[in-house]
Image (cartoon, rainbow, N blue to C red):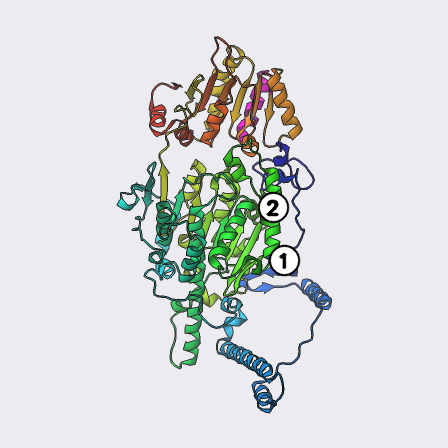
Amino acid sequence: MGLAGFLKKKKGGQPLPHPASHSTDFGPSRQQSVERPNKRRREPNSDDDEADLGLEDGSGGVLSVEPEAFDSFIRNLHKRRSSLVKRKKAPRKSTAEVDGMIAEAPKDKKGDVEKDEVMDAEKKSLEIKMKKKERVGVGEELNEHGDREEDHDEEEGEFLQENDDPEAKGVEDFFKVQLSDLEAADLGRGEIYFQKSDHPDYQSLWPNGEFECSNSTLPDLKAELKGYGVCPQVREAWQKANKGKIDGDFVNPQQNALFAMLSKYLDVFVSDVPYPSSYKDEEPMMDACVAHCVNHIFRSLENLRKTKAKIFEAKKTKGKELSDRETRDRGFTSPKVLFLVPMRSMAFRIMEKIFKYGAHHKEKNELENYENLLEEYGPDEKLEAAMTDESKPADFNGIFGGNVSDAFKIGLQFSRTGILSYANFYRSDIVIASPLSLSIMLSKGNLDFLSSIEIAVIDRADVSTMQNWQHVISVVRQINSMPKSQHDVNIMRVRELFLKSHGRHYRQTIMLSSFATAEMNSLFNGPACTNHRGKVRLKKKYRGVVGGGATMKIAKQIFERHGAKDLVDSADDRLEFFREKIIPKLRSSMGKGVLIFIPHYFDYVRLRTLLQTEEVDFCWVTEYSEEKHSRKCRAEFVRGEIRVMLFTERAFFYTRPRLHGIRDVIFYSLPEHAHYYSEIVNMLEEPMAGMQPSVISLFSKFTGLQLERIVGRKKAKKMLKDRSPTFLLC
């Protein structure tokens, strides 16, 4: 599959807009050569109910309607009602009538036993309904405002099988802390300082990494899931799903450490999650995150049930009153967990884990809407076999082995009978969406269902950087904002912390990536993530990919440091350095076959303008290039008809081609993916007699993270501080 397949929209075949645009979409087009069937259907989780009815939110949270809009709404309502097919139901018999039928029923006829069983079942059903109706009468305000418990509870009972876990109150304790306005303001400024942790349990877990804590300490490791407050249902499902794969309760010590940090509701950033080598690879880190989120949902729903029971008992007992704090147990909207995922295939793997740990007693085909879910998100074995390219690296097939669409959003709602997919967002417990889809919704001003998120998981943040990281920033900043409408919530049950706009200080943020970037660190360390429990991040020690057999020894690898004074002017400084130092080499010492690798599209635009001004003969391949144009440029480059070829990192990420005809390489700036450096260098052609290929890499103090991943931490520190700006590595 060529480059154009990644750079067109699924419909229309038009080139994609600029990466800064909210509609950037690279993923879906990889399936153009082999079409995946995809039904066009209206999803039940429509979030524009108020807009469809023509209602607007007025002051005080009350919906105000203009006369003309109200008349139009009534007419549309009558049309909708008239179009429905109404089914006539037989009137339900009263308890006395059922008792009379049972007493008068003849006992000497065949089939009397079956009749008695049917009548007993009908009587029991009627008694349950009357009992629920009595409860509604005691606390009418609970149902008039769309009480969540009745939505989830098909039967009376508890969500959890037992409540004697040593850490069972983790959810309550997380929300028990009451922040003052001054403390919240201090957290909101995002002024944090990380210190290296010396906890003995974590010293040997990551030999090439170390944990740093901010306003927190690492918890002790436990031997069992029960020690982390994981409820019995999740523990049972965990043992069943991982039977034969685990030693004790955990797949490996790293998973145990992640469970410990998640159970304390710390913000966690793990930047050492390797790329999968295939679509079916195990993901122990994501397993821990999903189990933690499912456990959080179960605990939260159990708390709602207990609060409801307390209110019911207080209504029955005269003179007994509950404090205001005892009855506040929810947010403005239902969703508690948000998964930000870059591709549908990754979202489907997460949903499979949610079903595995949250509804393990159900077969997949018994879950509601599972067939639609499998068709729109799931893998197609024949399609995956046709799209798998053995000539590509393993991590490429692991990332792009499924549905690579980056435009999706779906809600999951929990109940005792299972998990409903395609649930309405405002009634869902978990929302799984791509940053692109939520960014589009944000541009329309409709993200109120994220106002009460308690856990936000950003999975595969490294892949999101290859799409548009600005979408992630926009969505995370919007989480826990005050909603624009009331959405039928009982304000008397909303936690005071949400009413004070302190919700972001009670949100746990989990970020998983294969490496860390300056943009990821800025988001995790900034005011968008201000958990009052503190933060923990893994700082990996890189050995580098230069030398040690990872790159060709025959290539002369030169690293040039340009003196960028500040981040704002670093792009201008790099361009000026290229004009003064590199352009003369292009004209004198370098011949044909010069590849210039550019990490960012904006740098490509500036460099292209410079080369045109300097009258340098070149061609280009970017993430927006058509496949026909890409093939033509590469062919002309191989034949030597064009001396210089520009290639962007995003284009390389989505195609991973084997480039030929390369005799010299210039990295305009260091790539985010360190293994791309070694791949490109190893594509150099064998040199002619008396010639040695060269690799020139430009860097500055603002690309220190990329430099560390390529040359290693020790060399990177020396190269950033040394007086000499030029370094030769072989």
**Which disc is residue 230 wearing?**
none
Query: Is residue 606 part of the magenta span, yes or no?
Result: yes
Which span is picked out in magenta?
600-618
Which residue is located at x 46 percent, y 67 percent? 492
Picture quadrant where residue 120 is located: bottom right
Residue corresponding to mark 2: 380
Query: Is residue 592 part of the magenta span, yes or no?
Result: no
Q: Looking at the picture, how far across and down is residue 238, in whole percent?
A: 42, 55
Q: Looking at the picture, how far across and down is residue 646, in whole percent?
A: 56, 23
Looking at the picture, does residue 554 appear above or below residue 453?
above
Q: Which of the two discs, 2 and 1, labels the residue nearer the N terminus?
A: 1
Residue corresponding to mark 1: 51
Looking at the picture, does residue 684 appear above or below residue 292?
above
**Position of the N terminus by quadrant:** top right
Q: Amino acid at mark 1?
A: Ala
Between 692 and 445, the one nearer to me in the picture: 692
